[in-house]
Amino acid sequence: MWSRRSLLMSGVAAALGLPALAAAAGNKKLVVVLASGGWDVTFGLDPKLSSNYVEGPEVFMDPEHPSDVESIQTYSGIPIAYNVGKRRKVTQFFEDYGDRVAVVNGIWMGVLSHEGGLTRILTGARNRRGGDLCAIAGHSAAEGMGYVDLAGLGMFGDFAATSGRVGRRRQIKALLDPETHFDAPEGIGFNYPIYRPKPEHGDPLREWAAKRAERFRRDRGVLDGVDAAVDDYVLSLDSAARLQEIGPALMQGIPWGGDVSFVGDVRFATELLANDACRSVLLTTRQHWDTHSDNSSQHNSWNTTFGGLSHLVDQLEDKGLYEDTVVVVISEMTRTPLMNVHGGKDHWPHTSAMLFGGPIRGGRVLGGTDDWLMSRPVDLATGQLDDAGELLRYDNLVAGILELIDVDPGGFLPSVTPLRGLTG
Amino acid sequence: MALRGIRPSLHELDRVNAHPKQIDAVIDGWMDDREFDVTMGHLHAETLRTRVEINNVLPPGPLEGVTAGDIQGSINEAPLQIVREVIRSGAPYSEIVTGDYTMVNVVLAELYGLPFDDEGPEWARASWGDGRPHAGLLASNDVMMRHTSSDTNMNRSRGNFVARALLCEDLAIGDLAVSEIDLTDLDSVGDLVASEPACTGCHDALDPLSSQFWGFKRYIYRDEVLDAYAAGCPDPDFCYPLNFYDPDNEGAWKAYGLRSPGYYGEPARDLGELGQAIAADPRFISCTARNFMGWLTQTPRMELTESELAPVITAFLSEDYSARALARSIVDSSVFQEKIFAVRPEQYASMVEDLTGFRWMVDPDLATCEFRLDGCWGKTDLMAEDFNGFRTMFGGIDGYDVLEPIHSTTPVKILVVKQLASDAAGFVVHNDFELPASKRRLLTLVELDTVDENAIRRQIQALHLRILGERVSAESNVVSETRALHLGADQPREAWKLVITALLRDPRSLYY
């Protein structure tokens, strides 16, 4: 019997018109960090201090504090908006890791809404049917769940059976850690857990369920969708069992409920990757980037995010994951060149990305924007600015990221030219 | 399952088994059930995106005995209650945008200062009484609290709510051609939406819709309410009862130089006229059919073809915009009858409750929460929300970030099912054996000391029928396989818990 995954990984998929995974998907892992809401790239990756048409962080300089100065500093060839008082952790990150980082500026998004922008930057497409790049990466994992969405913003598309969410407040802990459980409301007459099958019943239950699944396939086989449903069910039974096996160790020290933080997410994400619980993880920075009012709060968001990113590098290295991991930091848009009347900035359909990890050749900037913060054409084969080149679009970036993790983007984003120049 | 979220009763199964032609009468009866009414709420929660727990939850403040979860839950449900009331009353479905009432419960009555009879039903009709036009959902505080707009976006998210949810025209996700626009003349940027051809395609439709909503505040933030109470309510607008609509502000669009209220080039001077224009628009009819058929057949609504929609639109129109007729025609269609479907979290929870009496209720802050101004969350239905619960982890939507349901089994969904199934099994086995057989839910044919093989097999047979709708003989392999599970447990109580747990995890429990 072909499973959906084995089918997809085979040549049969192409014959059936299904998306094909790379024949030999590698072991590279993928971490996507999403600055959801729309970061103002002029505070970091795409400084515009010399532009007369862009109001960047310099408009918030306080003349009463002579140390509050905006400038551009270059780290390993990467120019960064610098203000050590307000964005010290950005500076620290590039001082420590600038030689490992590639920045991509001037990514054309072609849409102004958050929903549309998130769809495009995560999937490389204008709809969510095909799943986001973490879902694609996760589906090609050797075993287990494949993709864990810690952000709650993932788009699983056709790859839902190998993807999973963990809950806004890490509710998954109550499902994986036998010591953690909810309390019943007072006066209800019982508390949780009411009943759990004994460990020795686990295998008989799973075997019974697998038989039942095949019977279901036979009984309902005339109906559309039965084969896929049964395959997903059986695959998910196995993946869930594996998660439960590693669950107690995995969830140790992972907080449940309360506020969750980017640094906490980083820790959880790297634990998941280190335990082979998945191949890809989606995180958010947990900052408020959508600054229609008071754009000055971008300072804190950049600072906090880069503190978390430094922690991510350290965690990946400590766990021996760095060399085989690609980290992508992105946002669905940047913000308008000029301030609005509320001291904020609105949506602007261009953005930047930052990548690091073992496969990335650091110390370089690809793409770029003009003085009005609009995307400039590039040579997609190198990522270098080229007036005779093409607009660098969201789909070029997503296809390029898939290549970085050894997934052939052609099966998912046909006719899209991948952005190259990030490795080598 | 699709229409009610619960299994057919044994009586219904027997009736149809004996007289197959009676299936039509049985289904007609289901359309009058409370569970169908509840299902209509679930359907519209996906369309209207109003069940949200993750953004700007208002605090209880001084409201006695009210939790933050109560407030958010009430705001979430009120728009759905308007729709349910329209459908329940048999009124034309278009009344959802023309009705002269809203729906309130005891919490919203306090939140908005509306009359409410504590002795009456949980939800009741109420009139706004502040001069706002009659426009059903379009005049609802609760809809507009969900679909807020930033200070600079000029109610456009509300305008797009109308286009997306009611007309199936999402104006926010189309391609821009801004890269071709000359931005060197910065003074003209603000006028682009009115003059630039790349922008006007959408803004000609969007902006007049958006100008309809200036009577509403753009938003009321949680912190504004907390700050107002902390300061002794110097600005009553941010203390309960909230004042979220001001008719005197309906014309505020003029001050921003925005386009006047309208409807796709036609006049519509206020929300009342907007509702009438929508109700008369063929796009509203076809979009309603898409919304219903998309949900019931678990198909992305924009992927439904005109030929698939045509017969259900005919049924909808021929029965005077009857939502019941529309739903009925969809379940009769080949699009519905030739597929299997995954249970949604709300359906699985209802099914389990109907079978076992168990609802997965928790109190997430029982141990830590003392009464505070910003409030405890309170009792939580784990399958119905995401602040603490498992709705999106099971495949549902959260109305804000997760906007598309997942209709396949996932590893995390299995984890949720495993835990809910075992808790429900423990609950029903404990309760059933405390009751006489005639009053039990599932274990009606055995006692704890039953050892007779035939009796045990008949009970397993009955469980397959009741829980899964699967008719098998007591001597079948199906029953033998389940009996083998039963024999694996040391004690009778444990054995029945194990069997019921397994049946609630069965593919037939997750698909229909």
Image (cartoon, coloured by chain):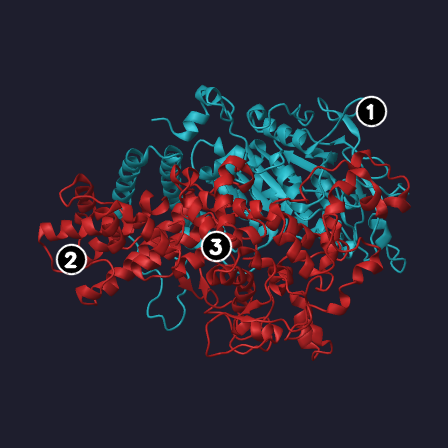
The image shows a total of numbered marks equal to 3
Chain under numbered label 1: A
| Farthest-out residue, front | B318
Of tags 1 and 3, the one toward the viewer is 3
Q: For residue A195, say whether it is visible.
A: no
Amino acid type assigned to the residue bearing label 1 in the image? Asp
Q: Tag 3, which secondary structure?
A: helix
Q: Is residue B236 above or below residue A93?
A: below
Q: Is residue A327 left or right of residue A347?
A: left
Residue ID at (26%, 41%): A208
Chain under numbered label 2: B
Q: Tag 1, which secondary structure?
A: loop
Whole-angstrom CA distance, mark 1 to mark 2, is: 81 Å
For the colour cyan, the matching chain is A
**Residue A190 place in picture, x, y as percent:** 33, 67
Amino acid type assigned to the residue bearing label 3 in the image? His
- Disc 1 crowd rating (10 Å Cα; few below 14, some 14-19, many 20+) is few
User: Which mark identifies residue B42?
Assistant: 3
Q: Is residue A277 above or below residue A384?
A: below
Q: Tag 2, which secondary structure?
A: loop
- Disc 2 crowd rating (10 Å Cα; few below 14, some 14-19, many 20+) is some
Viewer-closest of A406 and A76: A406
Whole-angstrom CA distance, mark 1 to mark 3, is: 52 Å
Quadrant occupied by the C terminus of chain A: top right
| Farthest-out residue, left | B452
For the colour red, the matching chain is B
- Disc 3 crowd rating (10 Å Cα; few below 14, some 14-19, many 20+) is some
What residue is pinned by disc 2? B445
What residue is pinned by disc 1? A387
Residue ID at (21%, 48%): B18
